[in-house]
Amino acid sequence: MDRISKLCSYLDKCTTFADVGCDHGYCTRYMLKNGLCESAVITDISAKCLNKAENLLLGYIEKGVVSSVCCNGLEGVSEDTEQVLIAGMGGDEILSIFKNSFIPRNFVLQPMKNVRAVREYLLSNYAEITLDEPFESGGKFYFVIKGKRVGVPSKYGESQLEFGLNLLGITTKKYIFAEIIKKRAYLERNLNEETRSKIEEEVRFMEGVLNEN
Ligand SMILES: C[S@@+](CC[C@H](N)C(=O)[O-])C[C@H]1O[C@@H](n2cnc3c(N)ncnc32)[C@H](O)[C@@H]1O
């Protein structure tokens, strides 16, 4: 399954939906086509990217079901929005969006990197993380983090901070295994002692996680 279809399968039915950093707007189209939201806001920091979504969703914009805002992150999004998707950008960018605005009521995040930093920020702000797992598409792994601003604050162990909540999941195991292979290949290089022992330690840690679970 392609990344967008897989990502969309994590979205819930809601009244109001926002697609932050929407680019082409495919996720919003999925929500509307499937009757999963009554209205949507599409935002992008780039007018050129937003324009792609505006073209895709023109019919919905004309009916007043979709509104589009060219803005940084959540600046153009109401804090009351029931479900917010922020996908396909770096974890640091997602964090700067939250720090600049707010943690959404219900969020679906798909950071491309620095996933641990996103987890740590949500946990330190007492958000509830209800799902945090990788999915595989086109030979790559992507993490999805779902949760709520207000709820039962989540508790994570060290392994979960690195690999998500679902350590028993088959895709998580595949992801860790793939990471071990990458690190082992890296160890074949001519590394200095400090780097070598750091990577060996990381491999031992990952092997430990796989063996414990
Ligand atoms: C790689 S695309 C991902 C598009 C779509 N969300 C997806 O998952 O396929 C990243 C989009 O995020 C937008 N973007 C990056 N930083 C942003 C920010 N701070 N606020 C709004 N949009 C941003 C970019 O312009 C780009 O269109």
Image (spheres, rainbow, N blue to C red):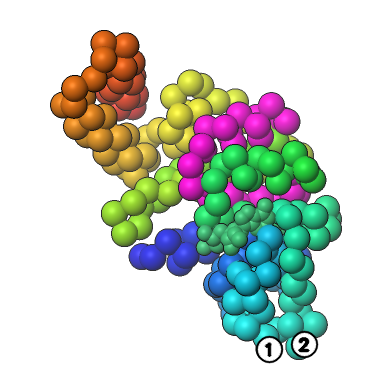
Query: Please, is residue 34 above or below residue 1 in the view?
Result: below
Q: Foreground residue, 103 or 48?
A: 48
**Magenta region:** 103-126
- Horizontal and vertical percent position of residue 116: 52, 32
Q: Type of residue at label 1?
A: Gly
Query: Please, is residue 153 above or below residue 54 in the view?
Result: above
Check whether the beta carbons of the residues at disc 1 and disc 2 lie within 8 A of each other: yes
- Name the image quarter holding the N terminus: bottom left
Q: Which residue is mark 2?
A: 63
Q: Which residue is mark 1?
A: 59
Query: Please, is residue 45 above or below residue 198 in the view?
Result: below
Q: Residues within 10 Å of mark 2 (few under 14, many from 20)?
A: few
Q: Residue at x 60, y 82 (%)?
A: 56
- Is residue 200 visible in this depiction of the protein? no
Question: Is 118 within the magenta?
Answer: yes
Alpha-carbon span between mark 1 and mark 2: 6 Å
SS class, disc 2: loop
In the rendered image, which quarter is residue 25 located in? bottom right
